[in-house]
Amino acid sequence: MTTPLQIWVEEQAKLTKPDKVYWCDGSEEEAHRLIEIGMKEESIAGTPIFRELNQKTFPNSYYHRSHPTDVARTEHLTFVCHPDKETAGPNNNWMDPDEAKEKMRGISDGCMRGKTMYVLPYMMGHPQSPYAKACVQLTDVSYVAISMRIMTRMTRDVIDKIGSREDFVKGLHSVGDFDPNKRFIMHFPEENFVWSVGSGYGGNALLGKKCFSLRIASYLGLREGWLAEHMVIMGIQDPRGDTTYITAALPSACGKTNLAMLESALPGYKVWTIGDDIAWLNIGADGRLWAINPETGFFGVAPGTSMKTNPNMMRTLKKGTFYPTLFTNTALNTDTNEPWWEGMDGAEPKNLVDWQGNKWDSSMGTKAAQPNSRFTASTSQCPALSPEFNNPKGVPISAIIFGGKRTQVKPLVVEGSSWQNSVFLGARMGSETTAAAIHQEDVVRRDPMAMLPFCGYNMADYFGHWFNIGKRLKRPPKIFSINWFRTDDKGNYIWPGFGENIRVLKWIVDRAHNKVGAKETPIGLMPHLKDLDLSGLSIKKENLEKLFGLDVKGWQREAEDIKVFFEKFGDRMPKEIWEEFYKMKAKLGGS
Ligand code: OXD
Ligand code: MN
């Protein structure tokens, strides 16, 4: 009997016209075979898809160079195609689904000619988890097939699981001819379908990640009563051996991966990693929020990663298991055949080529590694991986953190005073932009819950959904905002960050267990300094004031910016958001 899955694959092959169709089984042997093909037969802009790296120091690692125009997420080419524009909201680009499909059919006709179409059956989430989803992606490039094998649970069993069902998650991906004018990432939430052409970049091409697990899944969550969030999941073990699970949402390239596996600077504390990018949050029978990480890999920003900033990631990258590790658009040390990036440990190697293959040294004033260059590595290689990682139920969440990169105004840590106030706290977040998406860097943009680029529907409805979830929780987590990035008058970061962030996490955990008090301020609850362990840090008094004080004038300006953003949502905005906004504004005083 022909299944709906087979019919769908045949239809896509008829349109895209590959030379071959190959169904992947996710095995180790297959991964090696595809890497061999990528080293010999396929290329992007004349460069082989994979190049073997130094197998002694970076076992089972391969280097990949993308098309030079294709290095980050392209938010302006990303569309959410609900039948009506209002459902997509002002936070998304929208196109009518029929129009979008017609456009994509035109671009996709024959786009796999001369290539192999890889059929990738995969699960997002543990196959035994009630929250997991069965998915199939089609792609025409081995780099994406190998990356998906690292990032997801890819096996033939998924095909049996789908069986005769029609509601599996579908992804059609082709790198096309990399023409930026024919590059689109189209989402069809009503059909659990993503259609992406023209880009091989992770966030645009690994369709289980941002496209399904956030944009489409957030909409599924709205309809089914759960949340798909851009969040780290981690366990914090205290000196008594008790572990508290928390999640943290931060915009792209703001240190989520570092946070997820930080090595504690406080003796007796240990962090256990469950995920570094995506959390699916469901309400358990006990009325608590439970989190799973649907992914099985890290797709992290390489520059800045070192033994000092993220020792567990460096160990992960060098571990070498049967999962390959990929480095994309980093620089290369041509003496040792190792990847290299700005901020890596040790002196600058003598013989380097930059991410485009040109001879490079730092006197040239350019960057050797593309600022959004990435590694792709299996979570199984992480020494801090939580024993709960594969628990199909997930872990119970006691605190949620919202963060952003703000060099001014925002204090180190603030707590919401109620669920309603906390949703407002998440909704008012803003962050300075980074290289993870193509746009001007270092300007503040509002980024509620770090979900602005990933919420697959109108964010006004999303805030409403958060309020509804709160009503159903018997034991809601406490909610906090953090900002590691405040600078002093000379522009240097005040807070030491990285492993020292445990000091703030300890306070958050203590608050979650009602062990310490907090003081009320117009923007939420803030710590009494006596409750934060700052021992051994030498932060000047005026800088402590920046971290823990309230910049009233700055917040009055901030309120104006927040208002302009909220007004974009018109009448659809829940009244609770405005209630909290005006309460904060009144407490801040001023005009
Ligand atoms: C990512 C991103 O790749 O947020 O995780 O851009
Ligand atoms: Mn991310």
Image: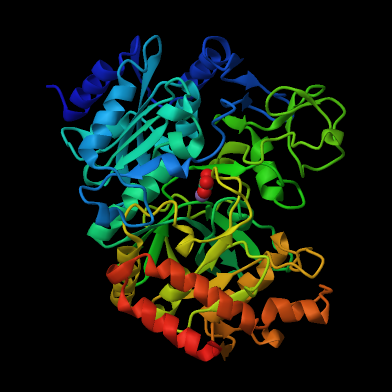
**Residue 239 at what x, y percent from top left?**
65, 71
> Can you say whether 273 is above or below 77 in the image?
below
Q: Residue at x 84, y 74 (%)?
A: 538
Judge left or right: residue 63 versus residue 481.
right
Total marks placed: 0
Above or below, 332 against 376 in this view is: above
Residue 476 image offset from top left, x and y in percent: 39, 76
Residue 171 sits in quarter: top left
**Is residue 509 visible in this depiction of the protein?**
no
Q: Quadrant of residue 380?
A: top right
Which image quarter holds the N terminus?
Answer: top left
* Residue 558: image location, x then y, percent: 55, 74
- Judge whether residue 406 can be spotted in this image: yes
Q: How is the image coloured?
A: rainbow
Front one among 460 and 493: 460
**Residue occupying the far front of the picture:** 591
Residue found at x 66% / y 67%:
502
In the image as oriented, which residue stretches furthest toward the left? 1
**Is residue 194 placed above or below 530 in the rendered structure?**
above
Q: Quadrant of residue 466?
A: bottom left
Q: Is residue 122 left or right of residue 201?
A: left
Point out residue 268 in the picture as x, y percentages from the top left corner: 70, 68
Q: Residue at x 73, y 28 (%)?
A: 354
